[in-house]
Amino acid sequence: MLIRKPGDILPSDITPPEIYRERRRFMQGMGVLAAGAVLGATRDARAGAKLAGVRASAYKLDEERTSFKDATTYNNFYEFGTGKADPAASAGSLKTRPWTVTVEGEVGRPRTYDIEELLKLAPLEERVYRLRCVEGWSMVIPWVGFPMHEIIRRAAPTGNARYVEFVTLNDPRQIPGLRSHVLDWPYVEGLRMDEAMHPLTLLAVGMYGEVLPNQNGAPIRLVVPWKYGFKSAKSIVRIRFVEKQPLTAWMRATPSEYGFYSNVNPEVDHPRWSQAKERRIGEFFKRDTLIFNGYGSQVAQMYRGMDLKKYF
Ligand SMILES: Nc1nc2c(c(=O)[nH]1)N[C@H]1C(S)=C(S)[C@@H](COP(=O)(O)O)O[C@H]1N2
Ligand SMILES: [Mo]
C-alpha cells in the first residue's frame, strides 16, 4: 500500500535507518509482517518504561556504572527538597505529559516543541558519562538522549546568539517546593554557544535504557559532563538564545561560590572546600578529580587563553 493516512507513522520515521533495517531483517526472520504495529508511534511516557530504538554510541567509559538505585535515590533537585532522598520521594507529583519545550530568543526559527516531537527529533543514543557534583561526589550514568546541537541547528540562531539559557518548569501546583525560597526560582542555567554546540552536550530523555525518572529531570534535561552537575538543568521547558551571559540560579544565589563556567577543575577550590578529590558513589576511598572531569582532550580548546581561576 502506497497511500499513507495522516496518522500512519512508519518505523523508519522514528528509528535510525541502520537500526530499522536490522529490526526489519530480524522481523522477517521471525515471519512478522506487520512490523509497524509493533512499534508505538509515541514513546511510553511512564518512568521505568523501556525506551525503544536506542542505539549504542562511541561514548563509553571503562569504569563501573553507578547502580540504578543510587542514581535514582541520591539526587539534587532542589525544587523537590534539599535532602538527597527528597526528589525520589516527592517528584511523583511532576506531570511529564503534556509537556512542551519552547525554543526562542535570537533564532530565525523559534518554535514550541511537544515532547513527543522531541523524542523523534534525532536518533536516541546511549552515552555513559561521568557526572561530578560540586559537593564532591560523582557517578557514572548511562544516559539516553540526543546532542543539543540537533535543536540548535533547527533553530537557526542569529549572529547575536552568544549564549543559551535553560529554564526549568516553574509550576508550584506540580512542584510544591517552589513555594519555599531555597533558590530564586525558576532554576536557570546557561552555556556559551560553543559549549552548547559541543558534541558532548546532551539532552537526556532516559537513563539505563529507560524513560528518565522524574527525580532525574523528566521528561528532558541537560547533561554537560565536563561541568559540575548543577549546570545540567532538569525538567526543561524553555531554551532561550541570548546575547548576554545568562544569570544562572546559582550565580544569583551565591556569586562568590558559583561562577558561570563551572568547569570541573581540581585546582580551583570552592570557597568552603577543596575540589581536588571526589567520592564515587558506591566506593569508599576518594579518587582524584580530573580537570574537565576527564573530558579535557575534547573540551579544553574551548577555553584556551582563558584564566580558569578568574572564569570559574
Ligand atoms: N532544575 C534543577 N536542575 C538541577 C538541580 C536542581 O536543583 N534543579 N540540581 C543540579 C545538581 S546540583 C546536580 S549534581 C544534578 C544532579 O543530577 P542527578 O540527580 O540526575 O544525578 O542536577 C542538576 N540539575
Ligand atoms: Mo550538584
Image (tube, rainbow, N blue to C red):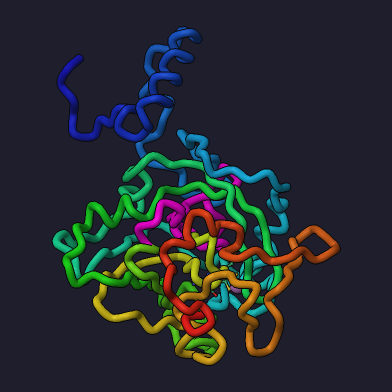
Q: Is residue 173 above or below residue 8?
A: below
Percent x, y of residue 27:
46, 14
Please give the range of residues in magenta.
196-222
Residue drawn where x is 42% and y is 81% of the image: 248
Residue 172 in view in this figure: no
Residue drawn where x is 28% and y is 70% of the image: 240
Give the image quarter of residue 197. Answer: bottom left
Mark count: 0
Give the image quarter of residue 173. Answer: bottom left
Q: Is residue 228 above or below residue 208?
A: below
Viewer-side residue, 18 vs 120? 18
Residue drawn where x is 43% and y is 10% of the image: 28
Residue 14 located left or right of residue 143: left
Percent x, y of residue 301:
44, 61
User: Is 92 part of what is drawn in magenta?
Assistant: no
Percent x, y of residue 43:
42, 42
- The quarter of the rendering in which ligand 2 is drawn is bottom right
